[in-house]
Image (cartoon, rainbow, N blue to C red):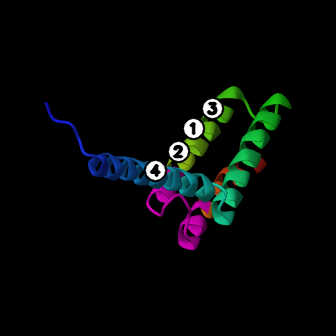
Amino acid sequence: MFVPSSKALQIAALAASIALLAGTGEASAATGARHHPRRAEVNHRFAHQSHRIHRELREGEINRGQAHALHKQDRAMRREKSFMASQHGGHLTSAEQQALNPQENGINRKLAQ
């Protein structure tokens, strides 16, 4: 029967601690990236857009089909934003934000009609 030495147990414990700390750091970095200013601004626009769609539906300015189509476009943009953010450690580059803004403006124009 093999009995690990004290030194082997210390090394195993140290390796486990390092692995645990490394995993925690990655989780913290990903969480912090969600609050990156560019990503936060895009998320704010998405939230505002969604509330506006609901309000205009409730007030009768758009019908259910129009609201559904706008929400579908909004979901597609959210998936695109998430994909973009996943490519850069959870944050958006300036160019990505600038690519999303005109798309969001297009949805806003459809609501203004």
Q: Is-magenta flag for residue 35?
A: no
Q: SS class of the residue under badge 4?
A: helix
Marks 1,3: beta carbons within 8 A? yes
Can you give x and y, in whole percent of width and height, for residue 5 in the image? 25, 45
Q: SS class of the residue under badge 1?
A: helix
What range is drawn magenta here?
80-100
The span from disc 1 to disc 3 (Cα, nearest Å) is 6 Å
The span from disc 1 to disc 2 (Cα, nearest Å) is 6 Å
Q: Earlier in the sequence, mark 4 or mark 3?
A: 4
The span from disc 1 to disc 4 (Cα, nearest Å) is 35 Å
Q: Earlier in the sequence, mark 4 or mark 2?
A: 4
Q: Earlier in the sequence, mark 3 or mark 2?
A: 3
**Which secondary structure is most common in the magenta stretch?**
helix
Please name the residue that numbered disc 3 is placed on: 68
Residue 113 in view (yes/no) = no
Q: Residue at x 58, y 60 (%)?
A: 100
Hey, what amino acid is under mark 1? Answer: Lys
From the image, state whether disc 3 or disc 2 is nearer to you.
2
Rendering quarter of residue 103: bottom right
Q: SS class of the residue under badge 2?
A: helix
The span from disc 3 to disc 2 (Cα, nearest Å) is 12 Å
Residue extending farthest to the right is 59
Query: Residue 102, relative to residue 23: is it above or below?
Result: below
Please name the residue that numbered disc 4 is placed on: 23
Marks 4,2: beta carbons within 8 A? no
Q: Is-magenta flag for residue 95?
A: yes
Q: Residue at x 66, y 50 (%)?
A: 107
Please name the residue that numbered disc 1 is placed on: 72
Can you give x and y, in whole percent of width and height, for residue 44 in the image? 73, 53
| Numbered tag placed on residue 76 in the rendering | 2
